């Protein structure tokens, strides 16, 4: 079997074209679906809870604002503690917005957005290795902070005094 010199020269080029397609960024999946899948427990009044059949709370409204900034719709999935982070890790959910502190243990498993509350240090975990998603999520969060929506949400739900939460 003979190989053409032209084919040998094309192989590196083909591998660079196929490689990015083999591992799509999370942001591409989110845009393709047109929705941000947000996991939460809906069991912590003020942060996220059920008001009758409707989800409510600071993190629900924050998720809505972030999805809007990313130009996708929010899709909230209520789950429990045993599935929340493992679901994000496996790609079942894109993010968890559930008053999660960035601990050293969790930083080993997930990438995080910048903090949305400093007291305590709370952020949004998502699958590791998605820099374009991180950039898009952080940009959305920065916009929500810059135009005063985050401050308004904090005042609405916590009267400027977010309660202390234990790290998971």
Image (cartoon, rainbow, N blue to C red):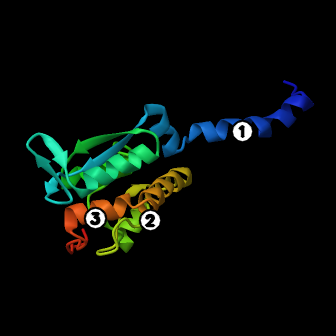
Circle nearer the viewer, 1 or 2: 2
Q: Residues within 10 Å of mark 2 (few under 14, many from 20)?
A: many
Q: Secondary structure at mark 2?
A: loop
In-front residue for pair 115/161: 161
Alpha-carbon span between mark 1 and mark 2: 34 Å
Q: Earlier in the sequence, mark 1 or mark 2?
A: 1
Q: Which mark is residue 15?
A: 1
Question: Which secondary structure lies at badge 1?
Answer: helix
The residue carrying mark 2 is 114
The residue carrying mark 3 is 154
- Farthest right residue? 5
> Residue at 36% across / 69% down in the picture?
102
Q: Is residue 46 left or right of residue 36?
A: left
Quadrant where the image shows the C terminus: bottom left
- Tell me: residue 154, above or below residue 81: below
Using the image as rendered, state which of residue 133 and residue 104 is in the foreground: 133
Work out how far the residue at label 2 is from the one at label 3, CA to CA, in angstroms: 16 Å
| Tag count | 3
- Location of residue 49 with respect to 20 vertically, above or below: below
Pick whichever, 72 or 165, lies toward us: 72
Against 73, residue 166 (above or below) is below
Q: Position of residue 65 (x, y in %)?
A: 37, 49
Distance between the alpha carbons at the discs numbered 1 and 3: 48 Å
In front: mark 2 or mark 3?
3
Callout 1 touching callout 3 (CB < 8 Å): no
Circle nearer the viewer, 1 or 3: 3
Q: Secondary structure at mark 3?
A: helix
């Amino acid at each position: 079997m003979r190989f053409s010199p032209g084919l040998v020269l094309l192989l590196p080029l083909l591998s660079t074209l196929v490689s990015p397609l083999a591992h799509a960024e999370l942001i591409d999946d989110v845009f393709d679906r047109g929705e941000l899948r947000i996991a939460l427990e809906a069991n912590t009044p003020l942060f996220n809870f059920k008001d009758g059949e409707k989800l409510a709370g600071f993190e629900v409204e924050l998720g809505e604002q972030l999805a809007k900034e990313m130009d996708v719709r929010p899709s909230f999935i209520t789950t429990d503690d045993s599935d929340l982070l493992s679901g994000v890790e496996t790609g079942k959910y894109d993010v968890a917005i559930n008053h999660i502190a960035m601990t050293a243990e969790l930083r080993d498993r997930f990438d995080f957005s910048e903090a949305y509350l400093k007291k305590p240090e709370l952020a949004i975990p998502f699958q590791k290795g998605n820099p374009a998603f991180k950039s898009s999520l952080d940009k959305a969060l920065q916009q929500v902070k810059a135009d005063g929506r985050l401050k308004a949400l904090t005042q609405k739900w916590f009267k400027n005094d977010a309660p202390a939460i234990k790290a998971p």
